[in-house]
Image (cartoon, rainbow, N blue to C red):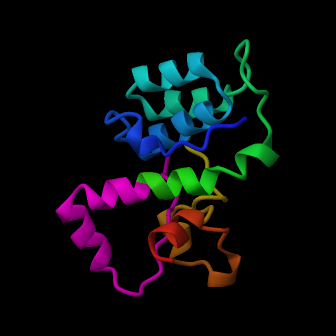
Amino acid sequence: MLSSTPLLLLSPRLTYRIRYMHYGKAIVFKDKPIAIKIMATTNHTTMKQLGTEVGQSPGAIPYSNEIWSQHDQRIVTECNIFKFTSSEDLKAKLLATGDGILVETARESKHWKADRKWGIGLTKAKTLKAPVDQLSSNLLGKILIP
């Protein structure tokens, strides 16, 4: 049986959104060695790389997009609820956006590729020039402002 335990009850060290998501992925697939490595690093690139290795450890449930897609939005939603309810400053900033559309843009870096699932798949500079109908799914923005 796959884990559906809310992660915010599991560890106060899940402060980075990227860590929370990939640790959650490791928990879903019962990949304890990768979960431990994710918790041991503070490097975002390493966290993302470890996330791609989930399900490969002995005894882990082999990774499947079909299984992950049943859990990913819940895990990212939990993370953001925790993030924005544990800081009055962050909560105020989020609420101050009103009814605006929030988007996650890609960093201007060779180490980060544009995220077309959680973000809009473009850098900030390209976003300002793109028609709205060309933006990707932006799931993070939809989670933050439903």
Location of residue 12 (image quadrant): top left
Q: Quadrant of the N terminus?
A: top right
Lateral position of residue 35 relative to residue 58, left or right: left
Say how many tags the image has: 0
Location of residue 2 (image quadrant): top right
Asked if residue 92 is among those painted magenta in the image, a careful observer would answer yes
Q: Which of these two is toward me, 129 or 53?
A: 53
Asked if residue 91 is among those painted magenta in the image, a careful observer would answer yes
Residue 133 in the image: state x and y as whole percent: 69, 82
Q: Residue furthest bottom?
A: 99
Residue 139 in the image: state x and y as whole percent: 59, 65
Is residue 114 at least partly visible in the picture?
no
Q: Which of these two is toward me, 113 or 54?
A: 54
Q: In the picture shown, does residue 3 fall above or below 138?
A: above
The residue stretch that appears in magenta: 80-109
Q: In the picture shown, does residue 19 fall above or below 118?
A: above
Q: In the picture shown, does residue 97 fall above or below 22?
A: below
